[in-house]
Amino acid sequence: AQSVTQLDSQVPVFEEAPVELRCNYSSSVSVYLFWYVQYPNQGLQLLLKYLSGSTLVESINGFEAEFNKSQTSFHLRKPSVHISDTAEYFCAAGTGRRALTFGSGTRLQVQP
Amino acid sequence: NAGVTQTPKFQVLKTGQSMTLQCAQDMNHNSMYWYRQDPGMGLRLIYYSASEGTTDKGEVPNGYNVSRLNKREFSLRLESAAPSQTSVYFCASSEARTGWAPNEQFFGPGTRLTVL
């Protein structure tokens, strides 16, 4: 069985500051990791994913995440956030056999 | 392409009433999923369908039934609604897995259900 833990339920940050959203997973088999973003009153959209290869993955809007197998983590980072990044972010893990397992979400609140 | 569509967007039920949530996708995906989203609990899988004609229970299937009507449509039915089923329900779809890695899931806009 696998599980995903997002340690922070809310992260307030000022505009243009850096941010890190933490995600840890547990799995007895090889795992594949995803970050999804949910803007208010919308469904989830894929932000980035790690399947294999380079452990550092990037999204088109400046976010990046690093797969760290020894620490079982997949933290999401952005060096400078914008007001428009305000949303809820979900980390998810999958082993390919069934649907994804999602974390409880982190609400990023970017303040001017 | 509309992607994944869900109806209705909002619904209020009384305890004991039944209803069906509809989901359709136009991306020719084989796999479809139903999740519920509750505050502080993320998304939890209710049922999924790996391909047309098959359905499997997820993490929280009690109180729900599903029908994979055809490749495009996957409905979720509440036979006797309970206040504990108040939630936001999301449908998602993905390509069938061709290797070991899971494919990206595409989500609908959600149905906000309140059971009084």
Image: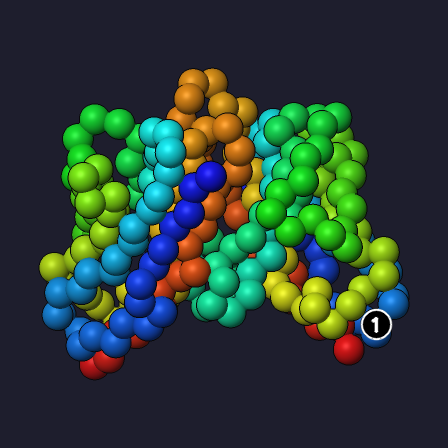
Horizontal side, residue B55 vs residue B44: left or right: right
- Residue A65's place in the image compared with B113, above or below, is above
What colour-coding does the image apply? rainbow
Residue closest to the eye, A100 or A1 = A1
Query: Residue drawn 57% across and 44% down?
Result: B92
Residue B66 locus on image (x, y percent): 76, 43
Mark yes or no: residue B115 visible.
yes
Number of numbered tags placed on the structure image = 1
Q: Nearer the viewer, residue B59 or B49?
A: B59
Q: Quadrant of the C terminus of chain B?
A: bottom right
- Residue A16: give x, y in percent of width and height: 13, 70
In which image quadrant can residue A54 be found? Answer: top left
Q: Residue furthest top?
A: B98
Of residue A31 and residue A29, the one placed in the foreground of this image is: A29
Can I make out residue B24 in this image? Answer: no
Residue at 55% x, 65% y is B38
Task: Give the residue number, with chain letter if any, for mark 1.
Answer: B15
From the viewer's side, name the closer residue of A60 and A54: A54
Element type at mark 1: loop
Q: Residues within 10 Å of mark 1 (few under 14, many from 20)?
A: some
